[in-house]
Image (cartoon, grey):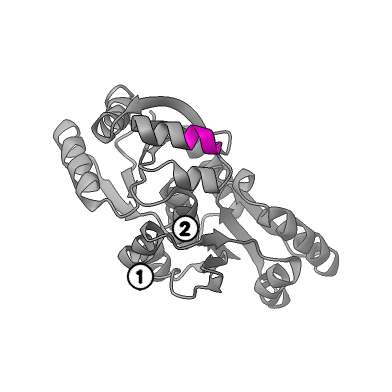
């Protein structure tokens, strides 16, 4: 049997604690100070996002190889394998450091397996896949079967996102300063989509209401698999999240709807007011 790992970019801290999953903590800082409480249900989203609104400098960093070795080696020493369902490798340089660590560990523990599954998703888009994989893992399903299942389901996953303020994308190098300035003046809201592990610009609309309507229309125009949850991820915009959930429930009364907060590791790059919808196609 393997040990099951996920990371703090999955934004399902309540499920992580309930299912007692092994959590890899991606470092995150506010005004240069490493934060310690963002990895559990004690995370104060209002305090965090309010600090961003007040101009706090937020950032993330990757783990180094020795830190990954400290996480993984005790499991291998105990004679167990590792199964890690991760967020998108295209969104962080930390995975290059992880690969270095795994290469070293595989030489030392050649009879053990370290399997990393790249969900090619972020936040709850990755989190729902972690949850599905963890359910099967808890039922004793073999790792190879779990991997095949996650890969099949992930191909049908759709993630659409809108941000409320372009300055956070500018800070992270996602857009130019000029684009952010013009977008702010004209009240332009980008529509982003997770595609091949990256968050790409799909469209743009004018105004917050139009951006939320766009996300809902993408859902309503799709052949949705209602055997899996429809997820709403939001960064300090609970009213919008609740409104979207009500609309979804009206259109899909039998749907299981998840409403999850975007944690700070992802949130410091997209900013308060970010909202996304995640669903699966048939």
Q: Is residue 209 above or below residue 9?
A: above
Label whose residue precedes the other's in the sequence (1 or 2): 1
Residue identified by numbered label 1: 41
Q: Which mark is residue 238?
A: none
Q: Secondary structure at mark 2?
A: helix
Evaluate whether residue 58 shows in this view. yes
Left or right of 177 on screen, residue 256: left
Q: Is residue 31 above or below residue 158?
A: below
In the displayed orientation, state which residue is furthest to the right.
Answer: 107
Q: Which mark is residue 134?
A: 2
Q: Find residue 214 and report its horizontal and vertical position in percent.
A: 30, 27
Task: Decide whether residue 178 is among the magenta residues.
Answer: yes
Q: Is residue 135 above or below residue 41?
A: above
Task: Decide whether residue 6 is among the magenta residues.
Answer: no
Query: Residue placed at 45% from the left, 60% from the top?
Result: 264
Q: Secondary structure at mark 1?
A: loop
Residue range in magenta is 176-180
Q: Find residue 249 and report its horizontal and vertical position in percent.
A: 17, 39
Left or right of 196 on screen, residue 211: left
Q: Chief secondary structure of the magenta span?
A: helix
10 Å crowding of disc 2: few (<14), some (14-19), many (20+): many
Q: Find residue 120 and report its horizontal and vertical position in percent.
A: 56, 42
Evaluate whether residue 10 shows in this view. no
* Image quarter in which the N terminus is found: bottom right
Left or right of 232 on screen, residue 121: right
10 Å crowding of disc 1: few (<14), some (14-19), many (20+): some
């Amino acid at each position: 049997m393997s040990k099951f790992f996920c990371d703090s970019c999955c934004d399902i801290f309540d499920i992580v604690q309930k299912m007692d999953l092994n959590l890899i903590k991606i470092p995150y800082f506010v005004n240069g100070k490493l934060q310690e409480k963002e990895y559990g249900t004690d995370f104060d989203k209002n305090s965090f996002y309010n600090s961003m609104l007040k101009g706090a400098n937020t950032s993330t960093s990757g783990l180094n190889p020795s830190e990954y070795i400290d996480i993984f080696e005790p499991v291998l020493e105990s004679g167990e394998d590792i199964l890690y369902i991760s967020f998108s490798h295209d969104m962080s340089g930390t995975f290059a450091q992880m690969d270095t660590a795994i290469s070293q560990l595989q030489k030392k523990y050649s009879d053990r397996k370290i399997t990393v599954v790249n969900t090619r998703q972020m936040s709850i888009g990755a989190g729902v896949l972690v949850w599905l994989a963890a359910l099967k893992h808890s039922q004793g399903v073999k790792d190879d079967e779990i991997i095949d299942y996650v890969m099949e389901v992930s191909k049908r996953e759709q993630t659409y996102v809108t941000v409320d303020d372009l300055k956070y994308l500018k800070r992270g190098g996602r857009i130019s300063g000029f684009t952010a300035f013009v977008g702010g003046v004209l009240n332009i809201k980008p529509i982003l989509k997770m595609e091949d592990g990256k968050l790409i610009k799909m469209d743009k609309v004018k105004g917050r209401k139009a951006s939320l309507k766009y996300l809902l229309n993408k859902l309503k125009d799709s052949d949705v698999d209602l055997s899996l949850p429809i997820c709403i991820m939001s960064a300090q915009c609970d009213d919008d999240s609740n409104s979207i959930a009500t609309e979804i429930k009206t259109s899909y009364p039998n749907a299981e709807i998840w409403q999850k907060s975007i944690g700070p590791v992802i949130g410091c790059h997209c900013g308060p007011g970010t909202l996304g919808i995640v669903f699966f196609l048939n």
